[in-house]
Amino acid sequence: MPLQAINKTFYKVADFISWQKAKNLRLAPQFQRRSVWKPGAKSFLIDTIVRGYPIPIIFIRDRRVNPDNFEPIREIVDGQQRLRTLISYVAPDLLEDYNPNRDHFFVKRNHNKELAGKDFSELTFEDKSAILNYEFSVHVLPSSMDDREIIQVFRRMNSTNYSLNKQELRNAHYYGEFKSAVYLLAEEQLQRWRTWKTFTDDDISRMIEVEHTAECIILIINGEISGKSSAKLDYAFREYDETFSGREEVEKRFRHVMDVIDNHFAAEMPGFIFFKKTLIYTFFAFMYEILFGLDQPTNKVLKLKQLTTDEVSKIKQVNERIRERAAPTPVLEATDRRTTNPKERKNLYEYLLKNVRHVKENK
């Protein structure tokens, strides 16, 4: 089938609703998966549409004409879960197999406070219009294209060697409170990650800075330094997906640590080694201990403190000592290696504390 036979166009949400009402839309052909989206994914989709952000292309195939209204049947080749989510939110009575236990959902507060907890009928005129007038990019496959050709198309689309890393898989699976907090904080620090040269553009495209932010949030919650652990990251995204108690306090503390680091040490670039991707977690943990204390529970509102002049000076001295290879061997080994295990992280953390904390204790 020549590429020219595919019609590339745009259709509004209202078009798909109208086709469903006229029984001209076929949502679940045999080669499509059944609806498996969780409420969080559905909520995220509605928020994405209201904000006018782009959504992946929808593929449909024109089929035989409906003899009752002389309109073609439009079969959803790829995008049925997106469209089913929209129909179940906007006009659930149009779904013959609608099941409230499976299909009903609300927009979550962490996605959109204005829409949270409201049915479509309760939205403002502006929000309703934003949803109904949202335009999908659609590729229309001709009716002459049979199932075997469609399967071939999708095999080719998915034949790339690109595989998702663990954070990208979490991104596809979770939509709740913890993910929202982590992604918000990581996005806020984007310019700093780049200025500090902590993460490359390729790192950022693969969500490495998001994973690092999640590690820092787990440190604040648990109050301890740990090695990089996929199991712990998975647990946090899962455990705090629905409810993230203390989220506001955690976000406040994270932002303050980042602000203090930037205010005092960004000017030391490029010679400040603690901005390295392999060291930034340990340095964040150290700074968090100095500014708040690792043992402070997140249900307690803490005052923001600043570094003293002596503390800043001592941190810079430690930085120079490591750069000049004058630090103890275990510390140098910890800074040379890919410091993602707890032993090396704690070696560096304790060295920093030993050379900085005593300044405060002697006052």
Image: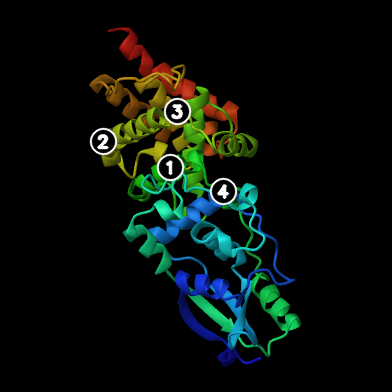
Which residue position is annotated with label 3? 285
Residue in front for this viewpoint, 314 or 172: 172
How far apart are the two marked residues, 4 and 1, measured between alpha carbons? 12 Å
Cβ atoms at labels 2 and 4 below 8 Å apart? no
Taking the image as shown, residue 25 lies to the left or right of residue 91, namely: right
Q: How crowded is mark 4: few (under 14 residues within 10 Å), some or many (20 or more)?
A: some
Cβ atoms at labels 1 and 2 below 8 Å apart? no
**Amino acid under disc 2:** Asn
How far apart are the two marked residues, 3 and 4, measured between alpha carbons? 34 Å
Q: Quadrant of residue 318?
A: top left
Q: Residues within 10 Å of mark 2 (few under 14, many from 20)?
A: few
Question: SS class of the residue under badge 3?
Answer: helix
Question: SS class of the residue under badge 1?
Answer: loop
Q: Which mark is residue 39?
A: 4
How far apart are the two marked residues, 1 and 3, measured between alpha carbons? 30 Å
Taking the image as shown, residue 11 lies to the left or right of residue 248, namely: right
Residue 167 visible in the shown view: no
Q: Where is residue 322 in the image (x, y as percent from the top left)?
A: 42, 31
Which residue position is annotated with label 1? 109
Camera-side mark, 1 or 3: 1
Taking the image as shown, residue 204 lies to the left or right of residue 303, namely: right
